[in-house]
Image: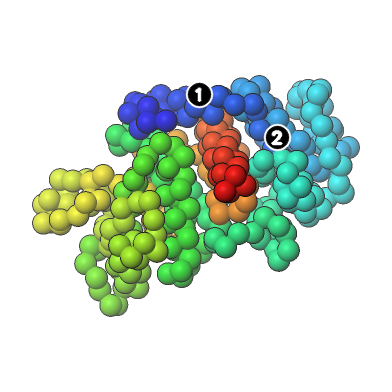
Amino acid sequence: MNSLVQATPAARYEQLIRDALGARPMRVAVVHPCSAEALQGALEARDEGLLEPLLVGPEAKIRSIADQAGLSLQGLPIEPVEHSHAAAARAVELAVAGKVGALMKGSLHTDELLGAVVSSGSGLRTERRISHVYAMSLPAYPKPLIITDAAINIIPTLAQKRDICQNAIDLLHVMGVPRPHVAVLAAVETVNPAMPSTLDAAALTVMATRHQITGGLVDGPLAFDNAISLEAASIKGIVSPVAGSADILLVPDLEAGNMLAKQLIYLSQADAAGLVLGARVPIILTSRADSLRVRLASSALARLVAARAAVQALGKEAA
């Protein structure tokens, strides 16, 4: 997987997909795929050999949309349910039963799907807070860059940021980065009691040294320029093992993360695969505006995460 880190930006997603093709395609529940875009995304991932889609939703509506869009559903199984809420609940049941290895958001609202995942007794909840990652490939940055959380946790607490950080570190391990560098972002690089984000950043840094966060090198607070530019950090006299080499940008809140991610996507031509982590199965989140390459990369990431979870489960059983 280390080849992903060394690849040129244009080749990173293709390499990610190749890395995910080493095993049998994963069965995925596509939840309420009642739009042409949702159906197209599932078919594309199937055609690339990444996924075996199981469509969960109102069968008549799904078939009607496929006919109107000129899409063939031949060979695709459909789990019929009445509406989007039932689709989310049934998809969770399928995942808990081990019949699917991941979920893929269709045309229902994200909070409706995730509500079913994290509801009490769903069977997919873990001790971790769920969080979203954008796995980005930027022409101007020499390696993949993770931004988290820009889609789920609105104003995360310190404890929630700890889980958000750990989820992202674990993902980078799957992507072949043995000790990811985590930059905890704020507007400044010094601790200021009037700015809670700097206090959280400093606390997370200490938590990593106390092994409350494991597997990565965490430092903060760091401003965005110091996190990704060693020159900027040097000019400001910042001595940090993470400055200029961040693999993960841990943002203060959802608004900051969402704006940062979309600025990079639309102004810096970044590709951004989306995935939800922290549940017992990965959850693929894509946008209607995503390119084919991004949709496939999101599926590939989910395949790799699920494969890693399966290996860990076997290890626990053997122990």
**Amino acid on which the number 2 mark rests in the picture:** Arg
Within-10-Å neighbours for mark 2: few <14, some 14–19, many 20+ = many
Residue positioned 57% across, 48% down in the render: 319
Q: Secondary structure at mark 1?
A: helix
Q: Is residue 291 above or below residue 265?
A: above
Q: Secondary structure at mark 2?
A: strand
**Amino acid on which the number 1 mark rests in the picture:** Arg
As drawn, the residue found furthest toward the bottom would be: 193
The residue where tag 2 is placed is 27
Residue 252 visible to the viewer: no
Q: Does 186 sit left or right of 126 as displayed?
A: left
Quadrant where the image shows the N terminus? top left
Q: Does 241 sit left or right of 104 as displayed?
A: left
The residue where tag 1 is placed is 18
Q: Position of residue 16 (x, y in %)?
A: 47, 29
Residue positioned 55% across, 24% down in the render: 22
Q: Position of residue 213 (x, y in %)?
A: 39, 59
